Image (tube, rainbow, N blue to C red):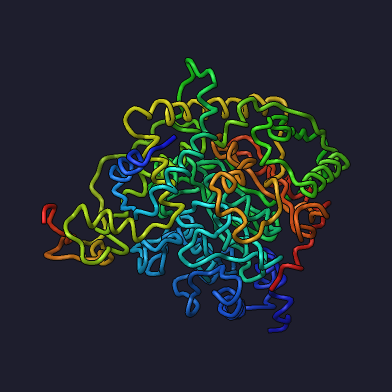
Amino acid sequence: MIERDEVLHVARLARLGLDEDEVEPLAAELSSVLDHIAKIGELDLEGVTPTTHVVDVTGALRADEPRPCLPREVALSQAPAAKDGGFLVPSPQA
Amino acid sequence: MSASATDLLELSGAGAIEAASAGSVTAPELFDLYRERAVEHGGPDGLNCFTWVAPEAPEGVPVDGPLSGVPLAAKDLFCTRDVPSQAGSRILEGYRPPYTATAVSRLIDAGAPLLAKTNQDEFAMGSSTENSAFGPALNPWDRTRVPGGSSGGSAAAVAGGLAPWALGTDTGGSIRQPAALCGIVGLKPTYGAVSRYGMIAFASSLDQAGPLTRDVTDAATMLAHMVGQDPCDATSLAFPEQIAMPRAEKLDGVRLGVPAELLHPSAELDAAALQPGVRDAFDATLALAERLGAEVEEVHLRHAEHALAAYYLIAPSEASSNLARFDGVRYGMRAPDVDDLLDMYTRTRHDGFGAEVKRRIMLGTYALSAGYYEAYYGRAQRVRTKIAEDFRQAFAGVDFIVTPTSAGVAFALGEKTADPWAMYLNDYFTVPMSLAGIPALSLPCGLSGDGDGPGGAGLPVGFQIAGPAFSENRLLDAAFALEQAIGFDGSPARV
């Protein structure tokens, strides 16, 4: 069972603002989903290698050479705010 | 033009290529014909399957390409240069990418102009297209029902005849399930067969682009112009052979495996129980396959019934990481009047994400957090290894594994939105293949009969065929033979 405090802790980790009336339903929904998922805790998975890549591949290496990237003004064109050739954000401590 | 507009709209993509080559229609005529229909029937007053329709025929499409100007619809989450691409989310409102996804640009380079972007569940999280900032798309067979999801806009557009064919993406069933619910063909290729570059990411170890089409030949035609290694996606692979046009008429000697664990699940999974009409259509298709020469036998996928649990740990975990980039800094929206940087992050994400996306970010963040990582994500990745092994063993004895694509036919709007797990159960038959990275195709195999809920009769049923990695050519061939024998009629869904 996921408690209210745990929901608020995870939301802080996820940088996700929640309204007061979102907290309790999320606690209930997450608890319910985790109940269904709990079954895999019963499987014997001793010595099983976790999947890191599902299709057999050899390392995809390429030469480490500089290549052109997006022009600065194009990269900034979609930003909510930009200034002096950079992304503009509010101060970390107001 | 000499052929009538109605005749042209009835053509499959490959049929339209033929008509264009024969000179009975020109590429601009075909584009205008579809554009007019897309505007009239594809918006909020119609099927709501499109989030954007091209204002005019795009420039820069080669006129002599093999796709001969047959227009393309692409799921909203494909980045398309200077064209709105917001993955069905409010948080990307106003975003116009500076580049185009490889899967889309390859089809454009082959001569398919971009007609429209299609509606989807936000960030591809959902099985009904109800989790969209644009509102739900509707199923053209019955507009009180969902088209499935998350590529529901693509499926509705193709089934409704508003696009000749469409691109979708499949993470746990998001091409196959909407194809099934809309009575069209949907193919999830082998993981890595198609570049993911420019696809707005959901779960990177699972996401794969694929075609949604009126028939199997069109799926092969699109796929042939999508596959291949891309320097921009290090997980993409060179497809080991050319994609051929399917021609098989028989299934002589083809061995089809029906997985016992999925078709007779334990009591815990009762909610995924097959509707009788789906079971009937599935059984009838197996019988038909036998008449075509196939051998049907039972196979075992010992861990398949744990696939859903593993999937709903792995996919949200990867999503919580991928979606960290939406923070109001580089693209999309930013919450107004914020106090400081942290406040901007949390309020932008609060305002921009919908309920299901928030749920999955929370689930994924929880599963990856200190103290839980090994119990959840670590275990899920081990289950994934077992599931992939199960498939490899099964394919030692059979050529393909077959299941219904979805346990039920298209359900009513709003029917499953209250209970997240009820919605997740839609993915029951499709996530095992996703976790194993293998190709799987949904083929319309008939209409459901009575007994599938109020008004559930007469809705399409999908037959899922899955093969080993890179078996797409054999898979398409087998599906083609079945398709010819089934003779499914998708015309009642045309708008």
Residue beneath the point at 68% across and 53% down: B180
Name the outermost residue toward the right: B291
The C terminus of chain B, quarter of image: bottom right
Q: Is residue A59 left or right of residue B116?
A: left
Q: What residue is shown at x 34% (from left), y 53% (from top)? A: A20
Residue nearest the observer in this picture, B237 or B370: B370
Q: Position of residue B241 (x, y in %)?
A: 59, 42
Is B347 on the left-hand or right-hand side of B449?
left
Position of residue B491 measured from the top left corner of the image (x, y, whole percent): 76, 67
Residue, x 56% and y 41% (percent of image)? B190
Q: Residue furthest bottom?
A: B1
Q: Nearer the viewer, residue B453 or B170?
A: B453
Q: Would you say B335 lies left or right of B409 here?
A: left
Q: Is residue B27 visible?
A: no
Residue B154, horizontal then vertical, whole percent: 58, 62
| Vertical position of residue B417 compared to residue B403: above or below | below
